[in-house]
């Protein structure tokens, strides 16, 4: 696997660290509050926090790999950083750079020089009646 550019690695690591901190806080708060009768977390709390951690870790992986959906998830997950202007604005500025955006663009591999040139296949007509498209 190729290593992404430094700006992409920074954003991916940031999302990964946030996801790991959420996982750590789940275990730490569960351990600290297990014997306290006045503080009790229901099972939904762990599901929500675990889902949020999974979202951040998934985003970190998608950004690192350059998956197109990672760009959108990175924007969504970066909303939490905006209240800290020194940190949040840096992440958003990095995500606006051409180098960051170029990491997510997919270019088809070049055809070998001896490959035959093919024309695109013609679009087939549907066997459905003309009015069928209204009900899809």
Image: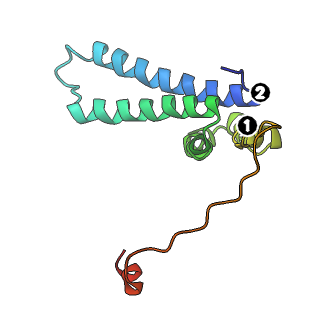
Left-right relation of 115 to 75 = right
Residue 73 rendering spot, x and y as whole percentages = 55, 43
The color scheme shown is rainbow
Residue 79 rendering spot, x and y as whole percentages = 58, 44
Q: Residue at x 77, y 25 (%)?
A: 6
The answer to which of 42 and 95 lies nearer the viewer is: 95
Residues under numbered marks 1 and 2 in contact, where contact means CB atoms less than 8 Å apart: yes
The answer to which of 32 and 119 lies nearer the viewer is: 119
Q: Is residue 42 visible?
A: no
The answer to which of 39 and 23 lies nearer the viewer is: 23
Q: Residue furthest left?
A: 37
The residue where tag 2 is placed is 5
How many angstroms separate mark 1 from mark 2 (CA)? Answer: 8 Å
Q: Residues within 10 Å of mark 1 (few under 14, many from 20)?
A: some
Q: Quadrant of residue 78?
A: top right
Q: Where, quadrant-wise, is the N terminus in this rendering?
A: top right
Q: Residue at x 49, y 32 (%)?
A: 58
The residue where tag 1 is placed is 103
In the displayed structure, 42 sits above or below 107; it is: above
Q: Is residue 76 visible?
A: yes
């Amino acid at each position: 696997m190729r290593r992404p550019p430094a700006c992409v690695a920074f954003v991916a690591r940031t999302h990964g660290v946030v996801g790991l901190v959420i996982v750590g806080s789940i275990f730490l708060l569960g351990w600290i509050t297990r014997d306290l009768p006045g503080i009790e977390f229901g099972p939904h709390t762990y599901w929500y926090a675990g889902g949020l951690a999974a979202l951040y870790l998934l985003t970190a992986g998608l950004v690192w790999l350059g998956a197109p959906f990672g760009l959108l998830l990175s924007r969504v997950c970066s909303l939490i950083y905006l209240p800290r202007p020194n940190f949040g604005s840096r992440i958003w500025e990095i995500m606006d750079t051409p180098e960051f955006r170029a990491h997510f663009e997919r270019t088809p591999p070049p055809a070998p020089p001896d490959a035959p040139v093919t024309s695109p296949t013609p679009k087939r007509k549907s066997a459905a009646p003309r009015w069928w498209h209204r009900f899809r």
